[in-house]
Image (tube, grey):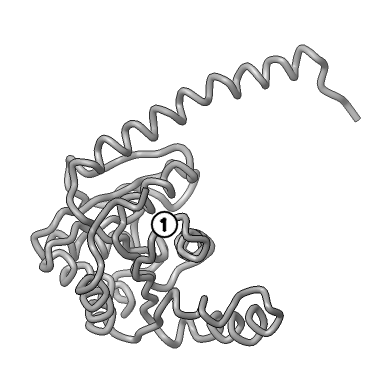
Amino acid sequence: MSHKTGKDWNEIKSNDSWAIFKIMSEFVQGYESMAKIGPSISVFGSARTQAHNKYYQKAVNVSRMLAERGYGVITGGGPGIMEAGNKGAQEGGGQSIGLNIELPFEQTGNKHIDVDCNLKFDYFFVRKVVFVKYSQAFVVLPGGFGTLDEMFEALTLIQTKKIAKKPVVLIGKDYWSGLIDWIKNTMLAEGNISADDLNLFKVVEDEEEAIEYIDDFFKTHSLTPNF
């Protein structure tokens, strides 16, 4: 078994220090670009969802309705549900924003992102900060690990009051029912969350219900950046 020498470790530490400037540049680029855009809502979901899937069309529909209400739509910029979200935003005449991430598979920018709203990131954590900072609500459609990561990031920040309460709405009762049952029957039963935490999100079946939930929320809450 080989061990790194002191010289090796010094080189690693030097590279880590220089990486800070790359990270800073991504934050600056993201903040400056998003600050020019009005109130927006994030739409999360799988990159693998095909256009014939019912949830692809639901993503198009809900994003179009959000755009028609004056919101920009933010997605991860890739295919699947993300593409559907950007497509719906453009159909609704709203701003269509893509926060792309460099990946060895799956991720390529979709054609429905506005040219001046196509941002590219190397770091997931920078991308997630930009998602959260500029999102007035989070619409979550079926997805995998990345979708769950983004959803629970938002819920954690709301739960811990690091950001103000924002609507988190999950579309597709069949898809989410197993997770919600586990949250209630295991997480809550073990005392790892409180009963009030179940009110941090809402599960709906249809796009219209999601829009109604968001509309009702902003009848009594203002639209502001999250931090």
Where in the figure is residue 77, as x and y percent of width and height? 32, 51
Identify the residue at the far right of this view. 1
Q: Does dot 1 land on a helix, a strand or a loop?
A: loop
Residue at point 29% right, 49% down? Answer: 98
- The quadrant holding residue 75 is bottom left
Identify the residue at the far top of this view. 7
Vertical arrangement, residue 226 with respect to residue 140, above or below: above
Image quarter of the N terminus: top right
The amino acid beneath tag 1 is: Ile
Question: Left or right: where does residue 188 sit relative to residue 67?
Answer: right
Residue at point 31% right, 56% down? Answer: 135
- The quadrant holding residue 154 is bottom left
Question: Left or right: where does residue 94 sit relative to residue 24?
Answer: left
Residue at point 63% right, 81% down? Answer: 188
**195 or 65, which lies in front?**
195
Q: Which residue corresponds to mark 1? A: 163
Vertical arrangement, residue 178 with respect to residue 126, above or below: below
What is the total number of numbered labels drawn onto the structure image?
1
Label 1: how many residues lie within 10 Å, few (<14), some (14-19) or many (20+)?
some
Question: Left or right: where does residue 124 sit relative to residue 65?
Answer: right
- The quadrant holding residue 67 is bottom left
**220 or 94, which lies in front?**
220
Residue at point 45% right, 37% down? Answer: 122
Where in the figure is residue 218, as x and y percent of width and height? 23, 70
Vertical arrangement, residue 100 with respect to residue 53, above or below: above
Where in the figure is residue 63, as x and y percent of width and height? 22, 67
Question: Left or right: where does residue 127 sit relative to residue 215?
Answer: right
